[in-house]
Image (cartoon, rainbow, N blue to C red):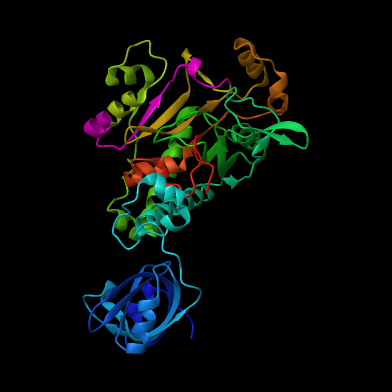
Amino acid sequence: MQRILSTELPARVGATVRLAGWVHRRRLLKSVAFLIVRDAAGLAQVVVAAPAVREQVEALTEETVVEVVGTVVANPTAPAGVEVVEPTVRPLGPPAVPPPFDLYRPVLTATLPTQLDHAPVALRHPVRSAALRISAAAVSGFRATLDGRGFVEVHTPKVVASSTESGANVFALDWFGRPAYLAQSPQFYKQLMVGVFERVYEVGPVFRAEPHDTVRHLAQYTSLDVELGFVADHRDVMAVLRETLAGMAATVGERAGNALATLGVTVPEVPAEIPAVHFTDALKIAGAPADEPDLAPAHERALGEWALREHGSDFLFVTGYPMAKRPFYTHPDPARPAYSNGFDLLFRGVELVTGGQRLHRHADYLAALAARGEPVEPYAGYVDAFRHGMPPHGGFAIGLERFVARLTGAANVREVTAFPRDLHRLTP
């Protein structure tokens, strides 16, 4: 008899079925026992009346893996309106050691550090696994949207020879006796791949050795990177980003509906046109000094509140960041060279995406590096490619964990990360 999932039970009323999963909970009443079995799809209620089977169930521990064979009957009070009766129950392994918290409770009561210490079992809780299902659906929507627009998925190195993009905030390692570093982003490589495919994207880990100890930062996170050629300026990039976010949101709604319901959240609406403000205007809206070189978290929150109040939007573009705060490869605004053709996208008052137009002429790269007093040699393999013809191009990067955290309302990005890596955590 082929195993079925708990969600298939309503279509099998009157049939004998085989279930398998984990002992989620046992309720041992005087005249009857209830065994709740959890599988990848949800929960199934098994009614145990026979003394011999009840004795078996009483000996089980939570999280023991079992197989159940029984008859499906309708019961409006049971999960999904059905339950399994007259069962046989067979353990598929030794009795499990119960985790240090109850997985059957609606909410995990353990502290977040305790949950993270015991992540392999904490992630079994429906609330924790729901966030990961939403994450998977978001990545699926990201890929599907870009595939449908002629983008090619690429895979770039995560070990690099020089720590060039952001100074010293990199993880060093030994590469067969030579110094090497974990990549902070696929930025350089995805630009080079524009010269091959014109439109590319990547889903992969990035590593930041920044000593942040906040609820929104990780030392390793998943970056959804995009780069496209033959753009007029950064606004073409922003348009693709809006389409991508809309595709991600739609796929989350389609593929993770149960997970959204578990968390009691809805998919945000991505406006047909996301409101945008220039950096100088953003400072005024946020009440920041006019000479502020960047937006602080408090400024981002104020801008998020303004976008929701004035435009009914959870999203807001901030364009034209000062060139001094952007990487050397950023294209300046031709009309205001002190400002960039770069942008951030705020999602509910938190920076989610950084992007913009890049330089594409070899001479401009030489000039940009010289202006910052940086030698060309560390960037030679990257900059040299622009001697061979590169189109005007730009791109962006979405932090997956931060996207899911803002969508679900998680207070800490670690709540939606399976095995977070940060300033303090390297295990499990």
Left/right of residue 392 with respect to residue 3 in the rendered view: right
- Residue 167: percent from the left, percent from the top? 59, 22
**Residue closest to the eye, 89 or 188:** 89
Residue 383: name its quadrant.
Answer: top right
Relative to 74, residue 291 above or below: above
Does 385 lie within the magenta span?
Answer: no
Q: Could you tell me which residue is drawn at 50 percent across and 27 percent down?
A: 233
Q: Could you tell me which residue is drawn at 45 percent across and 47 percent down?
A: 417
Relative to 342, residue 245 above or below: below
Left/right of residue 99 with respect to residue 423 in the rendered view: left
- Residue 193: percent from the left, percent from the top? 65, 38
Q: Could you tell me which residue is drawn at 32 percent across and 63 percent down?
A: 104
Segment tinted magenta in the rendering: 305-328
Relative to 340, residue 291 above or below: above
Q: Could you tell me which residue is drawn at 52 percent across and 27 percent down?
A: 357
Does 314 lie within the magenta span?
Answer: yes
User: Do we see residue 290 in this rendering?
Assistant: yes
- Residue 2: percent from the left, percent from the top? 49, 82
**Residue closest to the eye, 120 or 370:** 120
